[in-house]
C-alpha cells in the first residue's frame, strides 16, 4: 500500500504518518457541545474523522478513537466571558440541564448512525471526569496558574511556544481575538476553573480547591485524552476554529502537566468549515441546518456524506440545496450502476480491477484526498474490460473507506419522502400523465425519474393500488 501522508497543523506541512503502535492508532476528536442539535457543519467534522478512521482501518491499523461529549464548561464566548452554553440553553428552555445534555447527545449519535459514521471506541462525558479535571488542575496550579476572584487561570507565559499551533507565536494573539478578563496576566490566559459568583444559580456545580464552580472548557480534553489514550497519542482532530484557541490551550495544559514541550499528540488535524451564503454555519447564531431538515426535504443523509466527500477536508465547503441535489443524483446513479452490475452476474473480463484500488489508495494516502478518489470509483464502475464480479469486489474497498453503503443501499432507500408535500393536485396529475406516456413507450428510466421527483415532493405513486388510488401524499 502507498505510505500515508497527513497534514499536520502544528508544522503546517504534510508528514508521513508513523504511528507509535501500528496495531493501535490512538485518535482523539473534540466532540460536540450538547446544548443544541449538531448542525451540518459540526457533522462535517465527524465525517472527516470517520474517513480518517476508515482509511487507517483499511490500511490494516487497529484504532482507539475517542469522541468526547462536552456537557459542561463551553462558554458562549471563546474568551473566558459569557455564560456556559449548557446552562444558558437549559435556562432558556426551562429544562433540567442533564436532560438537555442527554437529549442532544442521543440526537448527535443518531445523526452519526444515519451518516454511516462508525462508532468510536468511546464517547466519554466531560461531567463524568470532573474529579480528574480537579486533580489535573491541582497538579499544574502552583507552577502554571494564578487565582482571580472568579476562578483559577492558566498563565500562558509559563509554557514554551504558546500559540505555535495557531501560528501566532511571534505576533501574539490577534487583536480582539481573546478579550481580557480583568486581572489576566496575558490576554491569552484562560480559565482552568470558574468559581460560581455569589448568588449565581448554576444547575451543574462541583466543589474544588478553588471554590464551588465548574471546570474551564479546555481542561476536559487534556484530561480525557490522557486518561483514554495516554500522555502522548497519535492524532488529535477538530474543526479549524479549534486551531486558534481550544487546541493551543489544550497543548499548554499538556505541557504544564508533563513538564515538557510535548504537545501531547504527534499530529494535530483540522477540518475546514462548512459555510453557507451567510458565512460559517454556527449554532450560536441560531441559523443552521440539521440533518433531519435534509430528510424533511427529500434528501438521504448519505447524499450529504457524498457532498462532503466531494471536497477535500481542508477546503471550505459551501452548502447549497443545489449541491446537495447534485450529490443525491450522483448517489442514485452509483446505486443504480451497482444494481445493474449485480444483474450482469458472471460475465468474464479481460482486465483486473487492481489498478483502480491502487489509485484509490494513492488518492487517500495523499492527505485523505476523497475528491480525487471519487472519479476513480466512476471509472471503475464503467470499465467494461473488468468483469462485473471484479468491479463489485473492488467496490467493496471503495465502500469501506468512503462509507457510502453502496453495497447495501437500494433505490427504494433513496426515495426519501418529506413529511410535507410541495406540489398541488394539478401538478401531480400532469406528472402522472407524463409517467404513463413514458411507461407506454417502455422508457422506464424516465418513468422512474418522474416517480422519484414526485417522492421528493412528498407524493408516493401507488401502482396497482387495489382501491384505485394512483398517488398519495405522505404526511
Ligand atoms: P461544537 O459543538 O461547537 O463544540 O463543535 C463540534 C465540532 O464541529 C468542532 O470540532 C468544531 O470545530 C466543528 N465545527 C463547528 N462549526 C463548523 C462548521 N461550520 N464546519 C465544520 N466544522 C465545524
Ligand atoms: Zn477538545
Image (spheres, rainbow, N blue to C red):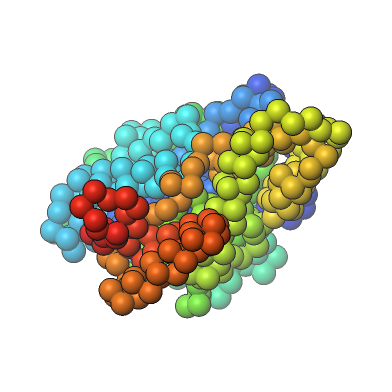
Q: Is residue 131 visible?
A: yes
Q: Is residue 120 above or below residue 465?
A: above
Residue 449: x and y in percent read 50, 61
Residue at the extreme front: 440
Q: Kindly identify the residue that appears in the image at 50 percent across and 41 percent down.
A: 409
Left or right for 175, reference 96: right
Q: Is residue 397 visible?
A: no
Q: Toward the viewer: 375 or 110?
A: 375
**Quadrant assignment, res 428:** bottom left
Left or right for 458, reference 142: left
Q: Kindly identify the residue that appears in the image at 74 percent across and 47 percent down.
A: 382
- Considering the image in quadrants, where does the N terminus appear? top right
- The total of numbered circles placed on residues is 0
Left or right for 460, reference 262: left
Q: Toward the viewer: 175 or 474?
A: 474
Q: Kindly identify the residue that appears in the image at 31 percent across and 77 percent down.
A: 426
Q: Is residue 176 above or below residue 353?
A: below
Residue 99: x and y in percent read 20, 46
Residue 314: x and y in percent read 65, 58
Left or right for 103, reference 222: left
- Considering the image in quadrants, where does the C terminus appear? bottom left
Q: Toward the viewer: 58 or 245?
A: 58
Q: Kindly identify the residue that appears in the image at 24 percent across and 48 percent down.
A: 466
**Quadrant assignment, res 83:** bottom left
Q: Toward the viewer: 461 or 187?
A: 461
Q: Is residue 16 above or below residue 293?
A: above
Amino acid at each position: 500500500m502507498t505510505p500515508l501522508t497527513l497534514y499536520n497543523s502544528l508544522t503546517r506541512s504534510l508528514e508521513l504518518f508513523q504511528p507509535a503502535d501500528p496495531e493501535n492508532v490512538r485518535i482523539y476528536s473534540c466532540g460536540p457541545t450538547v446544548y443544541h442539535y449538531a448542525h451540518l457543519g459540526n457533522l462535517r467534522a465527524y465525517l472527516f474523522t470517520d474517513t480518517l478512521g476508515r482509511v487507517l482501518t483499511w490500511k490494516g491499523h487497529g484504532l482507539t478513537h475517542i469522541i468526547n461529549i462536552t456537557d459542561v464548561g463551553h462558554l458562549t464566548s471563546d474568551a473566558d466571558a459569557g455564560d456556559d452554553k449548557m446552562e444558558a440553553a437549559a435556562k432558556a428552555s426551562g429544562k433540567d440541564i442533564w436532560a438537555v445534555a442527554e437529549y442532544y447527545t442521543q440526537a448527535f449519535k443518531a445523526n452519526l448512525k444515519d451518516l454511516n459514521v462508525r462508532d468510536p471506541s468511546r464517547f466519554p462525558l466531560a461531567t463524568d471526569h470532573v474529579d480528574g479535571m480537579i486533580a489535573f488542575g491541582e497538579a499544574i496550579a502552583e507552577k502554571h496558574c494564578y487565582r482571580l476572584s472568579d476562578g483559577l487561570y492558566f498563565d500562558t507565559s509559563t509554557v514554551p511556544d504558546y500559540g505555535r499551533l495557531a501560528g501566532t507565536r511571534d505576533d501574539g494573539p490577534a487583536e480582539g481575538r481573546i478579550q481580557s478578563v480583568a486581572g489576566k496576566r496575558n490576554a491569552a490566559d484562560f480559565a482552568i476553573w470558574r468559581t460560581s459568583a455569589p448568588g449565581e444559580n448554576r444547575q451543574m456545580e462541583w466543589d474544588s480547591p478553588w471554590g464551588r464552580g465548574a471546570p474551564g472548557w479546555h481542561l476536559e480534553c487534556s484530561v480525557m485524552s490522557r486518561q483514554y489514550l495516554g500522555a502522548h497519542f497519535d492524532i488529535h482532530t477538530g474543526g479549524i476554529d479549534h486551531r486558534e484557541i481550544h487546541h493551543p490551550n489544550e497543548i499548554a495544559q499538556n505541557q504544564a502537566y508533563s513538564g515538557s514541550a510535548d504537545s501531547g499528540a504527534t499530529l494535530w488535524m483540522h477540518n475546514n468549515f462548512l459555510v453557507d451564503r451567510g458565512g460559517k454555519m454556527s449554532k450560536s447564531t441560531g441559523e443552521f441546518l440539521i440533518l433531519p431538515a435534509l430528510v424533511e426535504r427529500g434528501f438521504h443523509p448519505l447524499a450529504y456524506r457524498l457532498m462532503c466527500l466531494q471536497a477535500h477536508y481542508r477546503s471550505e465547503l459551501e452548502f447549497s440545496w443545489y449541491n446537495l441535489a447534485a450529490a443525491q443524483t450522483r448517489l442514485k446513479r452509483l446505486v443504480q450502476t451497482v444494481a445493474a452490475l449485480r444483474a450482469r452476474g458472471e460475465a468474464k473480463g479481460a482486465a483486473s480491477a487492481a489498478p483502480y484500488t491502487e489509485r484509490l489508495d494513492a488518492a487517500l494516502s495523499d492527505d485523505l484526498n476523497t475528491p480525487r478518489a471519487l472519479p476513480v470509483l466512476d471509472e471503475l464502475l464503467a470499465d467494461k474490460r473488468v468483469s462485473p464480479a471484479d468491479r463489485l469486489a473492488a467496490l467493496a474497498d471503495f465502500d469501506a473507506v468512503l462509507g457510502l453503503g453502496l453495497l447495501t443501499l437500494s433505490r427504494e432507500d433513496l426515495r426519501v419522502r418529506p413529511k410535507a408535500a410541495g406540489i398541488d393536485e394539478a401538478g401531480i396529475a400532469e406528472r402522472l400523465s407524463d409517467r404513463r406516456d413514458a411507461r407506454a413507450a417502455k422508457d422506464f428510466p424516465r418513468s422512474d425519474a418522474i416517480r422519484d421527483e414526485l417522492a421528493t415532493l412528498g407524493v408516493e405513486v401507488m401502482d396497482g393500488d387495489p382501491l384505485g388510488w394512483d398517488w398519495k401524499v405522505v404526511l
